[in-house]
Image (cartoon, rainbow, N blue to C red):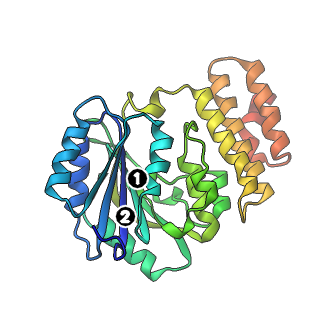
Amino acid sequence: MKTDNIKLSITVITYNQENFIEETLESILNQEINVPYELVIGDDASSDRTCEIIQRYEKKYPNIVKPIYRTKNLGHTGNYIETTKMAVGEYIAHLDGDDLMLPGKLQKQVDFLDKHPECSMVHHLVNFVDKSGKIIGKTKGKNATVGTINNIIMQNHIINSSNMFRRSCLDEHFYNIPHTLMLHDKLAHMIKAQYGNVCVIKEYLGNYRVYSESIFKSASAYKLFKAQLYTVDYAKNLQGASEYAIRKGKSILYLARVREHYKKKNYTRAKYYLKLARYSVKYSYDTCRFGLKLLLK
């Protein structure tokens, strides 16, 4: 396959998703797109029929499908980083192996980046669907991240399977994301946002699968919190990241822990995280309003 004329790379990462991967790949290959593209699929040493299904598509679309069959499991983050390294297109769109693209997604995002050179990445709204594909929720347009790296540091609303970005935004920070990091999405978005604005198409152009067996649903709240805290703290190494955004981002994470422990009636831990939140943003009532109410009780 010639790679010098590929405009768009679509990366898909998958592990033991035999029940979803075919529908995912069909949603990509059925897109109407007027630029040369490749489909890079990173299988993370699946033990079910996922590889067999991918091989069928490799034979059917030999000039488009570029599979990677790993013999050692790298984990969700490791598979994402290593698969992205193989992309050669000017633009890269990512999709997890159980999510779906809706008609028009790729062309609209390519056209948007062509018209907006000031944007490093563009994402869109998504439907949340269950295992059967039934819509159970939606992202809200008013919460969509638009702006700079600091918006993402404070609160990330970008679904990873909705973003398309310029490959030129990938740097040593991206390629050095620890493979053991449980959540890579926010850090990856922050890194890309060093190089331009973050933009959004306020249309529902994808379906994001949510179910209890997913890696993030089954992870402990504390492990997720530690991964998020690492990500916000890492921002101090990135261009354009403000000290205030980092402090505010930490405060928001701490307050989430306050709420969690308060619900469990573990008031000692709730007050501990409240102190950390108020230390991060000392005089922000908006940020600490929940904790302030708790202290007044």
x and y percentages locating residue 114 in the rendered image: 43, 80
Quarter of image, res 194: bottom right
x and y percentages locating residue 34 in the rendered image: 26, 76
Q: Label 2, secondary structure: give it.
A: strand
Identity of the residue drawn at 58% across and 38% down: 181
Left or right: where does residue 68 sit relative to residue 81?
left
x and y percentages locating residue 26 in the rendered image: 20, 53
**What label sits on residue 161 in the rendered view?**
1
Quarter of image, res 277: top right
Q: Name the residue under label 2.
A: 9
Question: Where does the C terminus fall, quadrant-wise?
Answer: top right
**What label sits on residue 250 in the rendered view?**
none
Left or right: where does residue 266 sit relative to residue 275?
left
Identity of the residue drawn at 46% across and 51% down: 159
x and y percentages locating residue 58 in the rendered image: 20, 52
Q: Nearer the viewer, residue 55 or 237?
A: 55
Q: Is residue 297 visible?
A: no
As displayed, is residue 203 above or below residue 250? Answer: below
Quarter of image, res 15: top left
Amino acid residing under circle 1: Ser
Identity of the residue drawn at 57% across and 50% down: 186
Q: Can residue 104 be seen in this view?
A: yes
